[in-house]
């Protein structure tokens, strides 16, 4: 059962003494409600089904337990927990403070360099407190960082796949749950070294969280991931393991070398080459932020005009794994927009010992906070022959990334061609039909992000924007809809990675890898369609060169060859 299969609870339902007022969101593992206490305090209540199998039930209990260990303004604050209904429990509920704000990628456009560093500094402080308590996040990304509207402070949320050594390992696959583009090199190296080994499972450490934060910072500075997807789609593991990322200042000349040095150190190939821990990173950022020889007021991407401010939305502070896309934020990150931070920074270790607690806010009071910070190692000096170096570095870049690299205000139009015929990845057709039980020609509705699935607003896409399954994809469900007993071919929130091609009026997509929530990577052969089954998607109104918008809900069709 998925939360998508359970009708939302009606307003007025009472859970743990609070009254349900509205649905805030729903994902593969939980539904989150806005609730109000008898005293008038508004909070977010996450409802997790206990009948989705022992692993998910155990993960729900783990999230509850981890939440009791973490108390800090930069971390999700859990206010209570219990089971519901009380007589015959079918759900576990977790109550969190409600944050009025946006995810980091939504909040980022139009911010200054100082704000960018401040937000990363605040997340470093959150990780310092979390790691001191023995808790790993294991899914640090923009979608799991909220920025309070009232104070501007970043809050690290969603410890749904978090880990503490006191708890047993739940994941059966090679990797713990997480988002592949943010996965550290040591994890990929372990996966290669132990491929096919029964029971092999990579155990993440603090260095994994720091690497993921490095990916976040890189995207804030450049508008792209440190490494491009592989030709067949999915992660280019060879690049992650053996190649250095392109220095951010070559993609965006406005990135100071001092900030770049911190970013590149976080992206080092081994944990030992990164910072000794989150506290050291925090101190380095705090020292960096105090420097007066860096212009912190300059936007990283001044050639871009900040978008209109989105309407206020309530976000759940640490509670919900809403299945946001691994590349959530591509809508602005791909455009080369800048990011915002804010701040001040209390000492992380001291914060662990005596964490400041905030009282629940009454009614709809928004919450925000800011924090600055500093220093780190410095990257290599730029080559003297700067023009040839920059031109070489710009090869292969497109859109806003190319504009930033060349330092020209000229807009770069999307590639105007449809992709040529191409064979499926080796073994993909056999796996889809024989193992998963899918049929060639079968089609399923997909979404780019959970948020756009709800709002139905057009989505900005780039060449590597992934899709996800909103609800289990059942084998044979297209033949006998509503039938019970069909096996799940691909579980809820499975991600599809591949490549998008931009034609004159349509976007074409070929997806060649499926990444399941349990960490499996499967070869697939699927093409992007509209909801009527036509190949590709028409550009949505508002599209322009370098900024392509498409429908929020699309189709994905099983094929035996890309034609």
Image: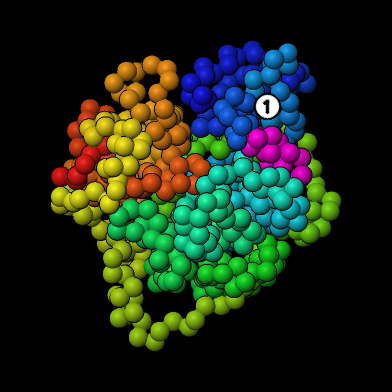
Up/down of 490 relative to 342, above or below:
above
Reply yes or no: does residue 470 show up in magenta: no
Q: Which residues are magenta?
A: 58-76
Location of residue 363 in the rendering, given as x and y in whole percent from the top left corner:
69, 26
- Looking at the image, which is closer to me, 148 or 60? 60
Location of residue 455 in the rendering, given as x and y in whole percent from the top left corner:
42, 30
Quarter holding the C terminus is top left
How many badges with numbers are in the image? Answer: 1
- Left or right, 407 with respect to 188, comes to left
Quarter of the image for residue 200 reads bottom right
In the rendered image, is residue 507 in sight?
Answer: no
Which residue is rendered at x = 84% and y = 51% of the image? 354
**Outermost residue toward the front in this view:** 198
Reply yes or no: does residue 73 show up in magenta: yes
Which residue is rendered at x = 69% and y = 15% of the image? 88
Location of residue 96 in the rendering, given as x and y in whole percent from the top left corner:
69, 34
For disc 1, the marked residue is: 93
- Left or right, 378 with respect to 19, comes to left
Up/down of 13 relative to 126, above or below:
above
What is the basis of the colouring in this image? rainbow
- Looking at the image, which is closer to me, 285 or 532? 532
Which residue is rendered at x = 74% and y = 47% of the image? 166
Which residue is rendered at x = 56% and y = 61% of the image? 211
Up/down of 116 relative to 32, above or below:
below
Location of residue 536 in the rendering, given as x and y in whole percent from the top left corner:
22, 39
In the rendered image, is residue 440 in sight?
Answer: yes
- Looking at the image, which is closer to me, 442 or 75? 442
């Amino acid at each position: 059962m998925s939360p998508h299969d359970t009708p939302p609870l009606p307003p007025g339902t009472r859970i743990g003494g609070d009254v349900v007022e509205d649905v805030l969101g729903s994902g593969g593992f939980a539904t989150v409600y806005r609730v109000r206490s008898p005293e008038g305090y508004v909070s977010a209540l996450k409802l997790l089904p206990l009948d989705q199998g022992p692993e998910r039930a155990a993960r729900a209990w783990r999230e509850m337990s981890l939440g009791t260990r973490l108390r800090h303004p930069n971390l999700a604050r859990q206010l209570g927990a219990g089971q519901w209904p009380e007589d015959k429990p079918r759900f576990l509920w977790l109550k969190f403070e409600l944050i009025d704000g946006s995810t980091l990628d939504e909040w980022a456009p139009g911010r200054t360099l100082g704000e960018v560093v401040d937000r990363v500094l605040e997340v470093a402080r959150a990780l310092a407190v979390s790691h001191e308590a023995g808790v790993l996040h294991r899914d640090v990304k923009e979608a799991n960082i909220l920025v309070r509207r009232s104070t501007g402070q970043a809050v690290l949320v969603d410890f749904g796949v978090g880990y503490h050594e006191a708890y047993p390992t739940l994941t059966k696959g090679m990797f713990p749950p997480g988002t592949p583009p943010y996965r550290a090199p040591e994890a990929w190296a372990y996966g290669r070294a132990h491929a096919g080994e029964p029971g092999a499972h990579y155990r993440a450490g603090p260095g994994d969280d720091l690497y993921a934060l490095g990916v976040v910072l890189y995207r804030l500075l450049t508008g792209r991931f440190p490494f491009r997807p592989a030709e067949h789609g999915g992660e280019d593991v060879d690049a992650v393991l053996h190649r250095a990322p392109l220095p951010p200042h070559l993609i965006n000349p406005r990135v100071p070398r001092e900030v770049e040095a911190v970013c590149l150190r976080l992206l080092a190939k081994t944990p030992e080459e990164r910072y000794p821990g989150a506290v050291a990173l925090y101190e380095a950022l705090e020292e960096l932020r105090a420097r007066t020889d860096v212009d912190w007021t300059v936007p990283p991407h001044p050639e871009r005009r900040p978008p209109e401010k989105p309407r206020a939305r309530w976000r759940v502070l640490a509670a919900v794994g809403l299945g946001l896309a691994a590349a959530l934020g591509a809508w602005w990150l791909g455009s080369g927009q800048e990011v915002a931070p804010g701040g001040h920074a209390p000492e992380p270790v001291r914060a662990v010992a005596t964490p400041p607690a905030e009282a629940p806010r009454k009614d709809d009071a928004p919450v925000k906070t800011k924090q600055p910070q500093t220093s780190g190692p410095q990257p290599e000096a730029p080559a003297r022959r700067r023009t040839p170096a920059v031109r070489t570095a710009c090869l292969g870049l497109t859109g806003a990334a190319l504009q930033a690299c060349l330092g020209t205000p000229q807009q770069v139009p999307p590639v105007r061609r449809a992709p040529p015929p191409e064979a499926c990845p080796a073994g993909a057709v056999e796996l889809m039909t024989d193992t998963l039980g899918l049929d060639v020609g079968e089609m399923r509705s997909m979404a780019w992000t959970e948020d756009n699935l709800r709002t139905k607003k057009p989505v900005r896409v780039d060449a590597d924007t992934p899709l996800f399954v909103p609800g289990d994809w059942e084998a044979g469900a297209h033949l006998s809809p509503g039938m019970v007993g069909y096996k799940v071919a691909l579980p809820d929130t499975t991600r599809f990675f591949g490549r998008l091609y931009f034609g004159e009026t349509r976007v074409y997509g070929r997806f060649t890898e499926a990444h399941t929530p349990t960490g499996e990577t499967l070869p697939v052969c699927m093409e992007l369609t509209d909801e009527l089954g036509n190949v590709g998607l028409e550009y949505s109104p508002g599209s322009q060169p370098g900024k392509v918008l498409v429908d929020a809900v699309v189709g994905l069709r099983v094929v035996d060859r890309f034609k």
